Image (cartoon, coloured by chain):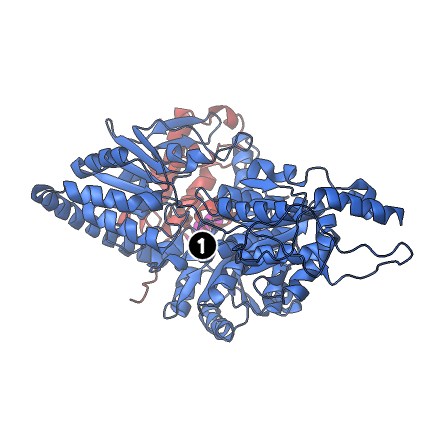
Amino acid sequence: MQTPNASNCVAGTPLVLSLVVAVVVVVGSAPNAHGSGGLQPDSAQVARGNATFKRVGCYQCHGREAQGASTGPRLGPAPLTPEAFARAVRTPRNEMPPYSLKLLSNADLADVYAFVAARARPHQLPR
Amino acid sequence: MGNDIDRRAFLKHTAGVVVSGAALDGSSPAPSQSGAPAPAPPPDVDALTTDRCGADCMVDVVKSIDLEYICANPGSSFRAFHESIVNYGGNAKPELITCLHEESSVAMAHGFAKIDGRPIGVMAHGTVGLQHAAMAIYNAYCDRVPVYIIVGNTLDATERRPGVEWTHSVQDASSLVRDFSKWDDTPISLEHFAESAVRAYKLAVTPPMGPVLIVADSALQERPLGADFRLRIPRLTSSSAPQGDVAAIDEVAKLLVAAESPVIVADRAARTPAGLASLIELAETLQAAVIDQGGRMNFPSRHPLNQSGQNRATIAAADVILGLELTDFWGTVNTQRDQLHRTTRSILKPGAKTISISTRDLGLKANYQDFQRFPELDLTIAGDAEATLPSLVEAVKRLVTGDRRSVFEQRGQQLAQASRNNYDRARIDAGYAWDASPITTARLSTELWEAIRNDDWSLASYLNPVSGWPMRLWTFDQHHQFIGGSGGSGIGYTAPASVGAALANRKYGRLTVTIQPDGDLMYAPGVLWTAAHHRIPLLMVMHNNRAYHQELMHLQRMANRHNRGVDRAHIGTAITDPNIDFAKLAQSMGVAAEGPIDNPADLGPALKRAVAIVKRGEPALVDVVTQPR
């Protein structure tokens, strides 16, 4: 889980770039990302992402299904671009607690991205 | 016997009020000041009884100011007053409400006043009871809500019984809460009590409102009185609320009428239904955006001009911002980023004008910092917003020309479309994770709305713990349908305040509901017994996320900031292992209850069953296992 020397580069560009690479690799297999849909989700990766999403506490602000709350926006099923998602996690410009590599590896983050991208479409409320 | 003589001497010199013949309504001439306790018995007779006592007069006083209820956990320092309420006073107006904690007593009075508009009473020990009550008094103070508190004490050291009466006595009882109460007094005679009690009520209900305290000395309460003793009680004349200066109101009207994108932001503005109506009239006259910050039920949730769902963007686009009784004007027009290094940023458009109408500056104290950061404003009016609004509406109407009216109409159409879009977006957002377990707060709010929407309902809980869903999804358009939050964010408010609100709603036959955070209820769950005992109809729907979740998120923030991870953030914040069975807790105190419900399909039917119970005049609880927010 821990990446050596990662804590020194929390806000560093190299970290973000490496993360983006990891997430981009994942996003091709994530369903519904940016409306692209077509590809089947990697269920194992989604399951790993679900576990990580819970383990590192993403759900505390965003809800257990990434559905969003007043404490954090909805993350899926159509997430931000991989680049924006990585920036938001590593170097948030808002109130979000930052996740350094020491806390969340790029592989873990890629799994989380797959999980949020695989969330279900909303139920339609009756009028 | 020596003590008896000392006691009489003390009473003669300190309590001396009196009299024969003065009417309780204060219509007769003032009584003499000579003091006339009950006739002293012959030296060899031990007088053991009296048919009248000072506390009877105190009951006459609280009847004269029309306190409907007195909430109390019993205490020996006000035993005579307690006895006089239930016997001499007939336990009616005020009726005694049995509470199991003084914090519950005050918070019940807090919730009651926010529905009814008038305070009810609280009795407490001047020492340990007031210490228990302190948090709730702070909430009421921050929320500018009147609560009328009578505390017992035994000031005369030579009169105290050995032991507990000493530990329950104090030189200056109210000093404990003086930093966060509006006024207090320690009367030393019954006439003094009458004057100060009436003054306290008057001050409590004059904006800015707040909690007040009167110390009822035990010697005054237990003082024997002659059968012909009459206490003159001053007539209560309520003050009109302070209104803004006429010239300043005209200036505000000019700015609003000339503005291209005016925004009205309201927090504790609508104290009564009249305030709600006035704000609607002002907004519609201007076709101006309104942001309701939720301190009171200020503006209908589905009104086309309500832009609360996009408050930051609306404020950022505004050229004139009118704040009505804002708790935090600075925080309304600035953001602060809670990261390792805190930074702030104004969201105001360059040149935007800021205006405040508020009584906030009229009631500030120095020690407790509820007054928030100092806002730099263009125009401030010290006056009650609700009382000032009618004059402002008229001033605006006088200035509106035909040209401006067409600009307003166009603006109103744009705002109405934005409001519709916002509502549609909310309904879509609520549908995400619809079948999730734990149950989403959006689904909980939707199911609850379906269960109550056809009744005359009132929501007594605040919105933050459930992400504001009720205000996004329900139709709030009457003043009693929402009462805002605690004021001081002191946990333990919601449950007793909801019971108090339900007590106030009972005489109107309203269906009171509350979405009850689990951690809040556990501060003083005995208020469930109070609801059952007094047949107070309340539907309590548990928002049982099994944590002090706000604090859990703070722990998470610190853990991430320090690169340590959140693995242990649950320590000291989670309420698990064991999970609390709220249905059993409620049932043990005579409240019908079911749960825990974690299957969302079970929620709607459970709520319907609970509503049926509440409509019979009883409290009911549904325990729902929920997502964090």
Local crowd at mark 1 within 10 Å, few (<14), some, or many (≥20)? some
Q: Left or right? Give the position of B222 relative to A91.
A: right
User: Is residue B340 or residue B463 the one in the foreground?
Assistant: B463
Q: Which chain is blue?
A: B
From this view, report whether residue B523 is shown above or below residue B475: above
Q: Quadrant of residue A55?
A: top right
**The magenta segment:** A43-49
Q: Left or right? Give the position of B417 relative to B109.
A: left
Is residue B575 in view from this perspective? no
Q: Residue furthest left?
A: B403
User: Is residue B102 or residue B601 the one in the foreground?
Assistant: B102
Q: Position of residue B25 (x, y in %)?
A: 53, 57
Q: Position of residue B570 (x, y in %)?
A: 60, 45
Is residue B475 in view from this perspective? yes
Which SS does the magenta portion mostly show? Answer: helix
From this view, report whether residue B565 is shown above or below residue B496: above
From this view, report whether residue B275 is shown above or below residue B13: below
Q: Quadrant of residue B374?
A: top left
Please report the residue visible at 75 percent of the width from the left and 54 percent of the height from the top: B76
Is residue B397 rendered magenta in the image? no
Q: What amino acid does circle 1 point to?
A: Gly
Q: Colour of chain A?
A: red
Q: Can you identify the residue that label 1 sits on?
A: B117
